[in-house]
Amino acid sequence: MCRSTLGLALGVVLISLVGECYGGLEYGYYDKKCTKTTFYFFFFPKTTVVNVEDIVAEEVTKAYQKDTTIVAALLRLQFHDCFVKGCDASILLDGENSEKTAVPNRSVRGYDLIEAIKQRLENECAGVVSCADIIALATRDAVFLASRQQLKYKVATGRWDGKVSLASNVDLPPPTISVTDSIAAFARKGLDRNDMIYLLGGHTVGVTHCALFQNRVYNFNNTGLPDPTMNSTLVEQLKKVCPQGSSSGTNSAVALDLGTPSTVDNSYYKQVASRRGILQIDQDIAFDGQTKGTVMLLAANYTQFYKGFGEAMVKLGAVGVKSYPEGEIRKTCSTVKSLF
Ligand code: HEM
Ligand SMILES: *[C@@H]1O[C@H](CO)[C@@H](O)[C@H](O)[C@H]1NC(C)=O
Ligand SMILES: *[C@@H]1O[C@H](CO)[C@@H](O)[C@H](O)[C@H]1NC(C)=O
Ligand SMILES: *[C@@H]1O[C@H](CO)[C@@H](O)[C@H](O)[C@H]1NC(C)=O
Ligand SMILES: CC(=O)N[C@H]1CO[C@H](CO)[C@@H](O)[C@@H]1O
């Protein structure tokens, strides 16, 4: 276990012994931890080391080949998990009043894939790999595939799973949040303004639904008019997709990045820079003085986006991580371990 809290002098020595650390986590934490013993001739034991990260990557690749929207599902899942009580897989827990049931979770997906990976790893080495680490690794691998293999950030591991999940703890930002309030919400998680701008780049994939931005198209801020910051051609297109007063209209899905809706790239920033952001917060970061400089930079420089998005995902993945005994390693991702 990587201990970032050790005394400085001792820490320097230890860090060189245990390898590279990040925010209390360690790169390659599972390297030799997952071992499987088989017997040949019914008697002679043979112990093999199982490569955990390879298994995660293999399962994510299979899932991605079936359905590329898994990348959006995982990005949103990790954001929601980490933002509520830290990256501890508490979002995966079932329960009458668990985080899963909270309203902003309505369209969170990807639970099944995480559970399938967990079950495969439990068969290799029971009680070793946390659900929280599976979320972080699987999201990284999905981003790698959806970025056409351009972006593979390094994920440190060693997260333990949380034991508590309450809908009442869910305080995720709404799409109408102001830039100032959003900066403050990220700051409460130890993420700065640039981290927020980069992480909103997660909206480079995936969809939203008419109900969450329809006011911008028909009646922005009770003016009876569209949002003046929205491209007028786009306003007309969205009126067709989201007809007023029809429930099928409010449920229709619209890509968050209309440029390259299923590729992880800097197109999201190009879209918002040309007034084609869908959610209000997406559009607002392109105009607010606190954020527009970075948005324009990212719209112009995809290398900078890959670099910064990877770094911001690593920071997101270290928010509120737990270790033993506060955390545990679950048997299944949807339930806490039995006390008995
Ligand atoms: C101020 C911060 C944020 C707000 C207000 C916000 C809001 C939203 C909303 C309203 C949706 C659409 C939900 C729906 O229509 O069903 C959405 C989708 C999404 N969000 Fe965010 N989000 C934020 C930050 C993030 C971050 C940091 C990430 C990841 C790094 C992220 C990744 C996604 C993805 C990938 C989707 C699409 C999901 C899918 O297609 O299944 N969001 N977000
Ligand atoms: C919304 O309207 C109020 C007053 O009607 C105004 O003070 C405010 O600036 C408007 N907000 C935006 C984003 O236009
Ligand atoms: C709006 O977007 C369209 C592309 O869909 C573009 O051709 C047009 O120039 C944009 N208009 C404005 C005012 O930016
Ligand atoms: C784009 O960003 C990369 C990475 O930060 C940097 O090395 C490069 O100089 C930037 N390119 C331009 C044209 O600014
Ligand atoms: C996946 C999941 O559990 N989604 C829940 C999100 O919240 C709504 C209502 O608040 C539930 O009906 C969903 O089941």
Image: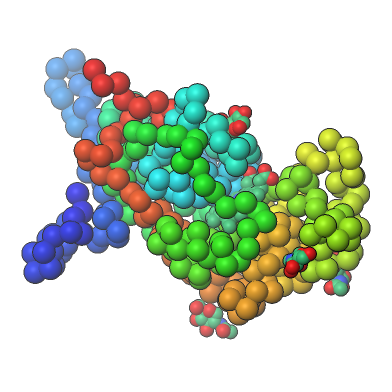
The answer to whether residue 238 is visible is yes
User: Quadrant of residue 222 in the image?
Assistant: bottom right
Residue 7: % across, % down = 11, 64
User: 274 or 18, which is in the foreground?
Assistant: 274
Residue 221: % across, % down = 79, 59
The residue drawn where x is 60% and y is 42% is: 104
Is residue 307 shown above or below 319? Answer: below
Is residue 242 shown above or below 216? Answer: above
Q: What colour scheme has been applied to the protein in the rendered image?
A: rainbow
State which quarter of the image contains the C terminus.
top left
Q: Quadrant of ligand 3?
A: bottom right
Residue 63: % across, % down = 56, 38
Q: Is residue 195 left or right of residue 292?
A: left
Residue 171: % across, % down = 52, 47
The residue drawn where x is 80% and y is 53% is: 215
User: 260 or 207, which is in the foreground?
Assistant: 207
Q: Is residue 53 left or right of residue 301?
A: left
Is residue 290 shown above or below 105? Answer: below
The residue drawn where x is 12% and y is 68% is: 8
